[in-house]
Amino acid sequence: MKSFFILLLFLSCNVLAQNAPEPYGAVPSKRQLAWHDIEVYGLIHFTPTTFENKEWGFGDADPKTFNPSDFNATQIIQAAKAGGLKGIILVAKHHDGFALWPTKTTEYNISKSPFRNGKGNLVKEVESAARKNGLKFGVYCSPWDRNNALYGTDKYLAIYQAQLTELYSDYGPLFMSWHDGANGGDGYYGGAREKRSIDNTTYYDWNNTWGITRKLQPTANIFSDIGLDIRWVGNEDGHAAETSWATFTPMAPDGKNVAVPGQANYPQSPAGIRNGKFWMPAECDVPLRKGWFYHPTEKPKTPEVLFDLYLKSVGRGAGLDLGLAPDTRGQLHDDDVKALTEFGNIVKHTFANNLAKGAQITASNVRSNSFAAKNVLDGKKESYWATQDNTHKANIEIDLKTEKTFDIISLQEYIPLGQRIEAYTIEVLQDKHWNKVFDGTSIGAKRLIQLDQPVKTNKVRINITKSPVCIILSEIGLYKKAI
């Protein structure tokens, strides 16, 4: 009898697996799926540049310049957590070359500063505070070094790779290894005070350099202008294009060959490329204030502006990376804490109650009972509604039973099987007529649609009008923005 039940379970699982839709196009890796779950994270800039009131340090600041009066990693992390951030990336070394950990690779590091009487390790303090408060941790170590005398020569690469190795080895598992395109220019360079130009497509030997990342930090998503795991959205304004594809094919200037690391500023970056060769979702990076470093004359963005950016980044299948700038104390200013907390409360309270929960839901086509329409309201994104293979157009109707008022609609695809839907409309029933309230294109990991004004209705219909393969939707939500 036991063998019979084991056989029955095996056959049931096998039938279910066979009935599941086939993946479409490029699909995310396990580490990319984990990144999609984070949605909002922060990027901390805090070096001698903070104390010089500059945006980019030249590399000539005396290490003694770095002297926060009351550094408090916990205060920074808890403010980030109040803002709904789920991860923190620390700029462990910016372009000025000053390392925030006692590295063996350069004398220009935190041990030469007054911080903790020369015994401090700011990377460790931030990492510990992040993990204690449940946030993921990542690092950015700039490849450009305006302090190092060897920068631009064939001897510098070993130094940079050694710095990455230290950061990858001593601070636990990382969710991201962050890189940007600031490579070469004028600098101190050990007193030379000159401009040094490099070919950023070859100088850093990215394939082997990022090979170190893959070996030592297999869970770390590599962010860079070209992508690899996560691509730059192409601006520092914090938003993706309204039509946003998670797939991308970085191309060389000739338009024929796949690009090499170091190339940047693709015109396709904000929207992505439909049916791109790689799953390469966008990161929307934007400073909380005007600049990435703290400047006393600047103010943080308002909670309303931050929520709008959330809708235009996370709500377009991308990630939102907020730049956090500690002041000369080594803490976030009270204005920043307030803005983050109020932003976090708007997001939290807006999406706390799915007004569609408990509704009756029907679909014009269903693949099987395992992929029923009700799956889009179960709060589990691993379950989904799917149509039969030959059905590329379908609708799903939500009967709310009583009238509800909402102004935000959330749609999610089951992205482990790819980004499939290319066009859809949303209608609401009013005065016995179906009125269209939105005309959309991409969905992907998450699509948040803010209507021009709240609507009151007891029925909502979503019409999928274009998909190259069978349709999959994992979650639907109706929400009223918290005031």
Image (cartoon, grey):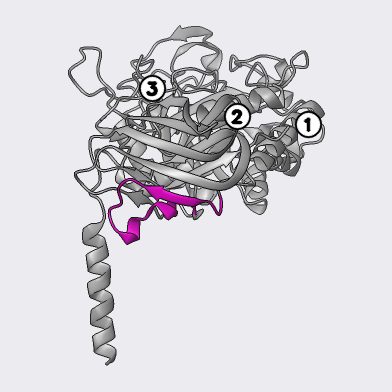
Where does residue 264 sit, x and y in percent of width and height?
A: 37, 18
The amino acid type, in three-letter code, at marker 3 is Ala
Which is more toward the observer, 336 or 332?
336
Q: Can you say which quadrant of the picture contains the N terminus? A: bottom left
Which is more toward the observer, 136 or 197?
136
Q: Residue at x 78, y 31 (%)?
A: 338
* On screen, residue 112 above or below 416: above
Q: Residue at x 76, y 40 (%)?
A: 75
Q: Secondary structure at mark 3?
A: loop
The amino acid type, in three-letter code, at marker 1 is Lys
Q: CA distance from mark 3 to mark 2?
A: 20 Å
| Picture quadrant of residue 241 | top left
Residue that label 3 marks? 271
Tell which circle, 3 or 2, labels the residue nearer the N-terminal end.
3
Residue that label 2 marks? 322
Tell which circle, 2 or 1, labels the residue nearer the N-terminal end.
2
Residue 338 numbered mark, or none: 1
